[in-house]
Image (cartoon, grey):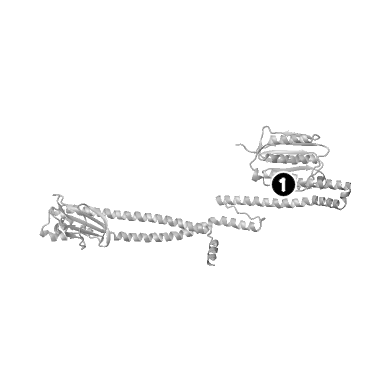
Amino acid sequence: MNKESNKLAKVHFHLSMSGKWTLLTSLFVLICVIVFSSVTYQKSIDTLIEVERENINATIDDVANRLKISNNELSIRNTAYYLSDEHSVLGSDPTERTLEANLIRLNSFISELSQPELSVSVYNTEQHLVFETKNTKHAYYGSEKREVSQKIVDGKTGFLATEPVYSKEKGEKIGYIQLFYDLSQVDSVKNNLIRLMFWLSLISIIVSALFGLALSHYFMRPLKKITEVINEIKTDPQTEARMPVEEMKDEFADLAIIFNDMMDRMQRFIEQQQQFVGDVSHELRTPVAVIEGHLKLLNRWGKDDPEILEESLGASLQEISRMKSLVQEMLDLSRAGQIDLHHKHDVSNAKEVIHQVYNNFVMLYPDFKFVLDDDILEEKEVKIYRNHLEQILIIILDNAVKYSMNRKEVLLSISTTYDYLEIAIQDYGEGISEADLEQVFNRFYRVDKARSRHKGGNGLGLSIAKQLVETYDGKIKVESVLEKGSTFRISLPLANKE
């Protein structure tokens, strides 16, 4: 049971984007603070130690320069004498009677050597201690040359500086000097810096966590809104809920635009699918019923009557042919709504396609008079797939032929404006009443249902033409007068050549 519980706990553990953002922000700031603090700490300590090293070098130089004046081996008397501030006034080695006076005059320099961290020891040539600023009794740790190094003396870490002293006048060795500078205060500074780094890191984590949480909340709002919209769409696929496009022009605004466009297309495809199923089921109901009726008739007794058998088979074949035509047109209509997936960027030569369709109709209908009025001086590219442009022209020209009356004439004219190809197809046929003009592009709508069925129409041609034109960002409209004829005007965008 424990293993299963652990597995479930692992499965259900989820860290939100806001939590990840906050965690990563805090971690990044913490790393930056630690790196910056570490570098600052190391540089500060190195600088402090280097300053102390320079100070002890300067001090040992000062002490050595004062003691080098002596011509005799160093002793407490001459050491005190030459370390005094006014030794230059006497100008020679001290005598017994001047010792007490020299000790009294050990003022500022000796005071400087007597600072708590520093101890100065002077030795004679046999390395016996003759003078010290503190009662340390340190032995001489040096050699016959100057040495400055960090050492532990009496349990304390510090700089130990040693140097033999030679008389400036005679060049003879007169003794040794040894300085020890306790670095305990440097350690205290180190501890203070470490504490400061700790509190700085802690405060940085808290501030960065709060700041990261606020930023994540601000930047995650669009994603949360997308999640809400997706959940709403999941509940109701037909909802109109969409992502609000933020005023700021950033990646989230682009994401919202793309998301809304995708949802519009998906909803349009769903509606087309539903309408396709509904329309097909509605339109197929009649031919299926007709075929079923004839088959039942034949099954009962009609198969023994040659006339009824021939009539039923003829009617059934006619309905099957109409069903095939209907399904094909429905598929064309469905595909027309998905052009942007396959042919959105296709272009066609306007004059070439229109002249080809015109010539085909002239050949197919020799008893009709087709007139082509071409005002385009040179070839123009139009933003539409070639087959779709042909299909639009064929649908409208075919209707012009079907619904013509006594005057069998069709006028086709083409021209261009700055951005559009303009096509007008005029016939002199039955025309369309004003009441029917508003619905002529609707699916399965027929102006005269009886005559339309007789002429083989399913009421889908103009719907397909309209869908194709509008999918390519064009426009189609109709002008008509009953018993006088109709004019269909089509505008399609031209491809601009740069």
- Residue 240 or 290: which is nearer the viewer? 290
Which of the 4 image quadrants contains residue 127? Answer: bottom left
* Quadrant location, the C terminus: top right
Residue 343 location, x and y as percent? Answer: 65, 42
Q: Amino acid at mark 1?
A: Leu
Is 336 situated above or below 380? below
Q: Is residue 467 left or right of residue 300?
A: left
Residue 384 location, x and y as percent? Answer: 67, 40
Is 133 situated above or below 61? below
Visible residue check, residue 22: yes
Residue 182 location, x and y as percent? Answer: 27, 59
Q: Point out the residue furthest to the top here.
A: 377
Residue at 37%, 61% in the rendered image: 195
- Residue 101 or 256: which is nearer the viewer? 256
Label 1 SS:
helix
Residue 256 location, x and y as percent? Answer: 59, 52
Q: Is residue 473 left or right of residue 149?
A: right
User: According to the image, label 1 marks what residue?
Assistant: 331
Residue at 73%, 47% in the rendered image: 330
